Amino acid sequence: RYEGSGPLPKPADTSSGFTDFWTAIDVNLSCHVTTHRIVLVDEKESIAGSIPYPLVHTAEGKGGPSFRSPKASYKIELNTLA
């Protein structure tokens, strides 16, 4: 989640973690696909953000149940132009 103001900063170094503005959160997060954008909602904090489709570079399904992790959740990996 981005906790700053202005344009979203890029992570400084993905191998060592994110900048101070980023908090990795995947609990209570839901994804809604509308006709014009992808909306991400933090159900616990009651906040949301959206990504317009023209800014989505790639979207790929990831994760899901497997033999080693039968209860793993499905995930969506989004790469954006912003």
Image (cartoon, rainbow, N blue to C red):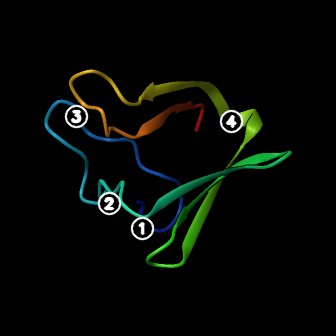
Residue at the disc numbered 3: 13
Disc 3 from disc 2: Cα separation: 13 Å
Task: Identify which residue, 73 or 13, lies in the foreground.
Answer: 73
Residue type at mark 1 is Gly
Task: Identify which residue, 75 or 82, lies in the foreground.
Answer: 75
What is the secondary structure assignment of the residue under circle 4? helix
Q: Looking at the image, is mark 2 or mark 1 earlier in the sequence?
A: 1
What is the secondary structure assignment of the residue under circle 1? loop
Residue at the disc numbered 4: 55
Circle 2/circle 1 CB separation < 8 Å: yes
Task: Identify which residue, 7 or 32, lies in the foreground.
Answer: 32
Disc 2 from disc 4: Cα separation: 21 Å
Circle 3/circle 2 CB separation < 8 Å: no
Circle 3/circle 4 CB separation < 8 Å: no
Residue at the disc numbered 2: 21
- Answer few, some or many: residues within 10 Å of disc 2's Cα (few below 14, many 20 plus, some between 14 and 19): some
Residue at the disc numbered 1: 4
Disc 2 from disc 1: Cα separation: 6 Å
What is the secondary structure assignment of the residue under circle 2? loop
Disc 3 from disc 1: Cα separation: 18 Å
Residue 23: quadrant of the picture: bottom left
Q: Looking at the image, is mark 3 or mark 2 earlier in the sequence?
A: 3
User: How far across and down, in percent of the image, does residue 27 sit?
Assistant: 36, 60
The number of callouts visible is 4
User: How far across and down, in percent of the image, does residue 74 sit?
Assistant: 45, 36
Residue type at mark 3 is Asp
